[in-house]
Image: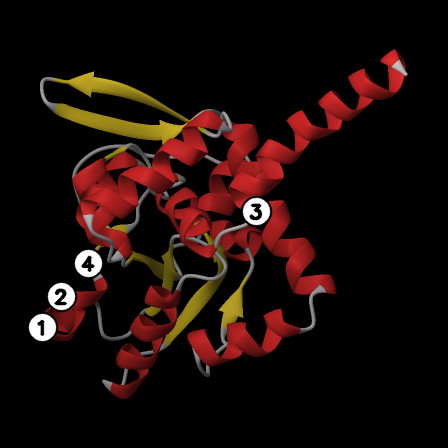
């Protein structure tokens, strides 16, 4: 009986992690934190939550060990507890995509058309090295500063319509954002094509780029 009880406690401890992940809002917060450290206010704003709700979800993630905090005066900054948390989040999405029947339809409804206009990380690196493409990061500027593909130009998607002229007309543009399921890159490619530019999307994004341990540049926008 003692062995059964200790086994039960072990699996209940595992279950705490599973329960923390069993909420769409908390998964979105992990997705945002995979781009870099943020304050509670910034996370609430990015996820469309009020501060009380955002704080409650973040506390659940902290209790499960998925995030850690640091205090800067009155501000509390959150970050992922480690690269393994980002790996778990990415794997969860992959497994759901492969085995959960509702995911592909939900993905297509959210991201919209344009899923076939994409290239791999290896193709991007080769073409960027050859000077054949412009790499465009359409995430918010603070995410770009926290880490981006070396040589990428930063134009947040909400500024792109007014700044298309900053991009060369004759060079193909490869767009990326947070990850494989980030709609910002899809929106940017559609906008650029509508403006007569040649544009394609990186198959995934910064989350997968980091997990592949590829070079990452940090600092101000290009």
Comparing 215 with 34, the one in front is: 34
Which type of secondary structure does the marked residue at label 3 adopt?
helix
Q: Residues within 10 Å of mark 2 (few under 14, many from 20)?
A: few
Q: Residues within 10 Å of mark 4 (few under 14, many from 20)?
A: many
Which type of secondary structure does the marked residue at label 4 adopt?
loop
What coloring was used for the rendering?
Answer: secondary structure
With 112 as the anchor, is 88 left or right in this view? right
Q: Mark 3 or mark 2: name the one nearer the start of the chain.
A: 3
Q: Residues within 10 Å of mark 3 (few under 14, many from 20)?
A: some
Q: Residue at label 4?
A: 155
Q: Give the Cα separation between the discs numbered 3 and 1.
A: 33 Å
Rendered position, 196 above or below 149 = below
> How far across and down, in percent of the image, does residue 78 sit?
30, 29
> How far across and down, in percent of the image, does residue 206 sit?
42, 47
The numbered dot on residue 162 is 1
Q: Give the Cα separation between the discs numbered 4 and 2.
A: 6 Å
The numbered dot on residue 90 is 3
Q: Give the Cα separation between the discs numbered 3 and 4.
A: 25 Å
Rendered position, 198 above or below 9 = below
Q: Depth-wise, is mark 3 or mark 4 nearer the camera?
A: 3
> How far across and down, in percent of the image, does residue 89 sit?
55, 44
Q: Measuring 9% from the left and 17% from the top, which residue is drawn there?
A: 73
Q: Which picture quadrant has residue 77? A: top left
Q: Measuring 19% from the left and 44% from the top, which residue is drawn there?
A: 51
Q: Mark 3 or mark 4: name the one nearer the start of the chain.
A: 3
Q: Residue at label 2?
A: 159
Which type of secondary structure does the marked residue at label 2 adopt?
helix
Q: Are marks 4 and 2 in contact (CB under 8 Å)?
A: yes
Q: Measuring 15% from the left and 75% from the top, which residue is drawn there?
A: 161
Q: Mark 3 or mark 1: name the one nearer the start of the chain.
A: 3
């Amino acid at each position: 009986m003692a062995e059964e009880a200790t086994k039960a406690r072990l699996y209940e401890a595992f279950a705490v992690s599973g329960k923390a992940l069993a909420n769409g809002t908390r998964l979105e917060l992990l997705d945002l934190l995979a781009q870099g450290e943020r304050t509670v206010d910034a996370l609430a704003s990015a996820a469309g939550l009020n501060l009380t709700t955002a704080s409650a979800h973040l506390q659940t993630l902290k209790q499960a060990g998925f995030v850690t905090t640091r205090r800067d005066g009155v501000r509390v900054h959150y970050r992922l507890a480690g690269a393994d948390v980002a790996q778990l989040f990415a794997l969860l999405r992959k497994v759901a995509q492969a085995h959960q029947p509702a995911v592909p339809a939900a993905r297509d409804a959210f991201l919209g058309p344009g899923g076939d206009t994409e290239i791999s990380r290896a193709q991007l690196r080769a073409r960027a090295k050859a000077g054949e493409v412009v790499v465009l990061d359409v995430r918010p500027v603070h995410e770009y500063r926290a880490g981006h593909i070396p040589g990428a130009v930063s134009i947040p998607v909400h500024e792109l319509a007014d700044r298309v002229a900053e991009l060369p007309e004759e060079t193909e543009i490869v767009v990326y954002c947070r990850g494989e399921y980030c709609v910002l890159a899809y929106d940017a490619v559609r906008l650029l094509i509508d403006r007569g530019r040649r544009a394609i999307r990186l198959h995934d994004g910064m989350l997968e780029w980091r997990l592949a341990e590829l070079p990452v540049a940090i600092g101000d926008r290009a």
